Image (tube, coloured by chain):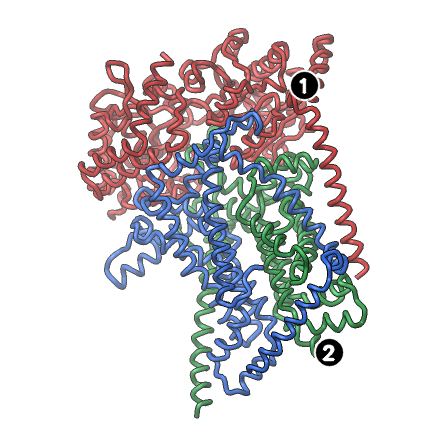
Amino acid sequence: MHKMHNTSMGRVFDVFNHISLLLLGLSTFIPFVYVIAASFATEAEIAARPFFLVPETITLAAYEYIFSTNTFIRSIGVSVLVTVLGTVVSLLLTMTMAYPLSRHHLLGRNLILNLVVFTMVFNGGMIPTYMVVRSLGLLDSLWALILPVAINPFYLIIVKSFFQNLPTELEEAARIDGCSDMGVFWRIVIPLSKPVIATFTLFYAVFYWNDFFNALLYISDNAKWPVQLLLQQLMMVANVDFGEMDVMLQDPPEESLKMAVVVVATIPILIFYPFLQKHFAKGILLGSVKG
Amino acid sequence: MEKSKSLLLLLFTLLFSVMLAACSDDSDSSSSSEGNGNDSSSETESDGGEASGDSEEPYEISIMTNAYTPEPPTPESPAWQAIEDFTNTELDITYVPSSNYDERFNITLASGDLPSMILTNKTSSFINAVNDGAFWDLTDYLDDYENLSQMNDIVKNNISIDGKIYGLYRARPLGRMAVSIRQDWLDNLGMETPTTTEEFYDVMYAFTHDDPDGNGQDDTLGTIVSEYPGPWDIMQTWFGVPNKWGENEDGTLYPYFQDPAYKEALDYFKRMYDDGLVNDDFAVMDPAKWHDAYVNGEAGTVVDVADAASRNRDKMVEADPSLEGSVDVFGAVEGPNGLHHLPTSGYNMMYAISTTAVETEEELHKVLQFMDDMNTEEGQKLGYNGVEGTHYEMKDGEFVPTTDQALIYEYEDLNQLLMFVPEDRYLTEPVDDLTKKEEEVLAENEEIVVGNPAEPLVSEVYSRQGQQLDNIILDARVQYIVGQIDEAGLEEAEQLWMNSGGKEYIEEINQLYQESQ
Amino acid sequence: MAQMSMKSKKVKNEAVVSTTQLTKMQQLLRDKWLYFLLIPGALYFILFKYLPMWGVLIAFQDYSPFRGFWESEWVGAEHFLNFFQNPDFFRLLRNTLILALYDLVFFFPAPIIVALLLNELRRQYFKRTIQTLVYVPHFMSWVIIASITYIFLTTSGGAINAAVEFFTGEKINFLSNPDYFRPMIIAQVIWKETGWGTVIFLAALASVSAEQYEAAIMDGAGRFRRMWHVTLPALRSTIVILLILRLGNFLDQGFQQIFLMTNSLNRSVADVFDTYVYFVGITQGMFSYSTAVGLFKAIVGIILIYGADYLAKKMGQTGLF
């Protein structure tokens, strides 16, 4: 009786759940479809129709412009390089730092954690950070886009608490087998942390991909501009500084071109997600604890 | 596992070596920190020595400027090299994306190693640097140069700081504001291009209510306005409202909204709104979509800039070729107090010359000579059109630019170096009638511009509170137009402005103004 | 039950004893490899976070970038006084606080709810598809979102307003009525960031074992009780940490979003610290003044973070440390 009630309730819930999530998914995706559609539309159509999902006349003009030179392809290459390299560096630094901080008995642990949290709220600002980057000789190097932002304290704290919640049985077993802390970290903790790694690979990769501000400050050589900087340029010039744009020398960018650059700059990181998804969808601890 | 360990090791050594590098770098810079940029100055000195000894040696100029394209030119560009040859210089140009130029400018200022020339606005950080002696006072040098000596007096006044000139401005038309209007709608209704504010009202009224496009439907508007307040500013100037500051007979300044004409203008706007001549969502309309209604034939006029007329015309013709010739443009209409036009500041940023990178008068002369050369016909052509035979052809005396995007990038952003003083001397494609008309409007407007007497003055209060002060008045104007507040509300807003630092602002400006006289 | 806790207390005591028996030196030596692992991260924080921290001092100076730090004039608390005495200070503070509260109450739970709902889906392909779709808006810039918002909400032909008019016979000025400003801002944030926010909760949920669910089912727990007793507790520490950390940036609002959605008719509720600082700091280049404002925000953040951490520990949660 009780159970039946539950299952029928459960069924109602299931239907409701499917429908609401489907609506949510559509509401988040349809605007992006508009962006894609607008990137293939003519300027006249974008001006005439407020919203559409399929353009009346399909034109490739915006994409022809983007790919008429190697500028955008090169900038995507820069973005990919920075993203891959940056994510590897960030993950290594974050994991190696988070693990010791997750051990309660570590002397000075609280002090270090406090110092880390402090930096999340307090920072010296743009100018002193620039001075440090410059004195390290990193200006105009892609490392300037990585090293100054290598550890996100926010992520560090979360990874630390993930480590804290790992079951201790395996570690103890390894220690009895004669593993040092180093051994425990590489052989037990890291393999157990696949979902964490997958999650923070995603977080760091998206961060590096979306960042344009550091490139703006540290990179003068335009051959090293990441694609987000070009996107930012196209989007902002005609908007925030409205009325200030130097229109006498440059026409404002066409709407379809802006949309096409959004598509080109977003698709690579979007398709990255489903690949990582299956990793953090896996049950993690179960198998290893049992085995 | 071994692999990850060695990776860690690699990273570790990397971080460590970086750390070591940091230390040695630090000690280096601290040892020479007394005269900031000692190294670079001694280098440039020796360079300068060589150059003066042998006049063939090109002079090295470093420049930081804006980039508007995704691919600014590089030293390999033929146009870049042609400029170097023409001016006998060696250029080191840093291009910064224009969207966030301010941040990069401030960082560069703070880092201490300024390039020879840096593009700047008249911000408070620039003015502070000027007061600290970071940039050359050019006032007494300009007359020695053929083109630089012909800088426009109004613009010179606008860029001046305490009456002195610290920059080479990049000229833009002073009289750029104008109204695009549907000529075919005027023809359909048998009306003439308006010449007074009341005629303009009648035209907008007829455009709204008399079916100017003849489709039998009530689907048109007199004019279209967006969140961007420009059109109201332009139109209120027609009524004789001062440009930011008005001058009393005793020589004191008062803010524009205290002028009696301001109320007249606002009542006109309110009438426009109440009669439905303007879109009722103007206060929230996305500025990026502003011109769409005009391009689509929903609105008959748009009050913006002269060059918008041909840009919009091109889009209209793309959708419907029969609309060729349906757009006209005019500068200003006469108000109850005469013919007035709201000018732009007349420039788009300026180049300031650093006293640390350019140490001697001799070097200063070379930099100024470079900029003067870039104003000649040859210089403007190289900077704006590129190299003949590569970037453009002359066919039967007509200018034909390349359409190859990669080649266009080779020269396009070099135009950021140009001042266009005393005039535009580059090549243009043969212009059509509308573009010609736009140019005429620019010239006519320049005759009737209303100057802002406080433009050269720099207010401390404004730096801190300016945006809030501006918003109080701009918001009240919109609220009055849409009927959210009445005259009492306008007065309240003025009172609020006074109490929010406006009083101090007026006092400060007046004091600065007296000092500058 | 009581026995259990006795036992764990005993274990804890033993651990304490064994630690105190070692001298500090011995402890350091024992954990040498842990300290070794710490070094690269510590270097990072020293180099890029603590070395530049002298920068906050320019809040007490009339900092001139060209003159540099040492040559700039010290002015004490002048910039702070100017800021607090700004006639708009309380309006900015009120707007900032209200928006921050709205954000906390309405946006913060959104990713948790969606993660819970996603977790209930059994068809993997459906679950993954939805996950991917809801995460797309995170990559859209505010400029585009503002433009799309205008397209849908405008009173002249916006789809949503057309629907509202159909049902109620009247249009609603979402974009200009100050009453709708905060809900609109929060709705945009929810739309843009909820999907992205679920990632971390889904990752945390991945650690809930099927056994725990099976055990709950054996106990006869229904759908909602399982959610309440198994799923939610698994998220608890993540939720607490994210909440505490969020408080550190309590007074930060996205400048760009607010800036783009503000207009003459709703500015009374839209002006926040971040829009103000943008004009003063970036457009006008007044470093010292904007640093002072930033410092004020940071101090509020520090107080909130540590206060919340203290409270969390009081309430028996692990907290940050």
Q: Mark 1 points at which residue?
A: B41
Q: Is residue B392 above or below residue A50?
A: above
Q: Is residue B304 left or right of residue B59?
A: left
Residue B469 image offset from top left, x and y in percent: 33, 33
Q: Name the residue under label 2.
A: A291
Q: Residue furthest bottom?
A: A1
Please report the residue visible at 69 percent of the width from the left and 24 percent of the height from the top. B32
Please report the residue visible at 39 percent of the width from the left and 57 percent of the height from the top. C102
The C terminus of chain A lies in quadrant: bottom right
User: Looking at numbered disc 1 in the image, what kind of residue is underneath it?
Assistant: Ser
Shade of chain A as shown in the rendered figure: green
Quarter of the figure with residue B493: top left
User: Looking at numbered disc 2 in the image, what kind of residue is underneath it?
Assistant: Gly
- Can residue A218 be seen here? The reply is yes
As drawn, the label of residue B4 is none
Q: Is residue B275 left or right of residue C177?
A: left
Question: Could you say which is closer to the camera, residue C220 or residue A28?
Answer: C220
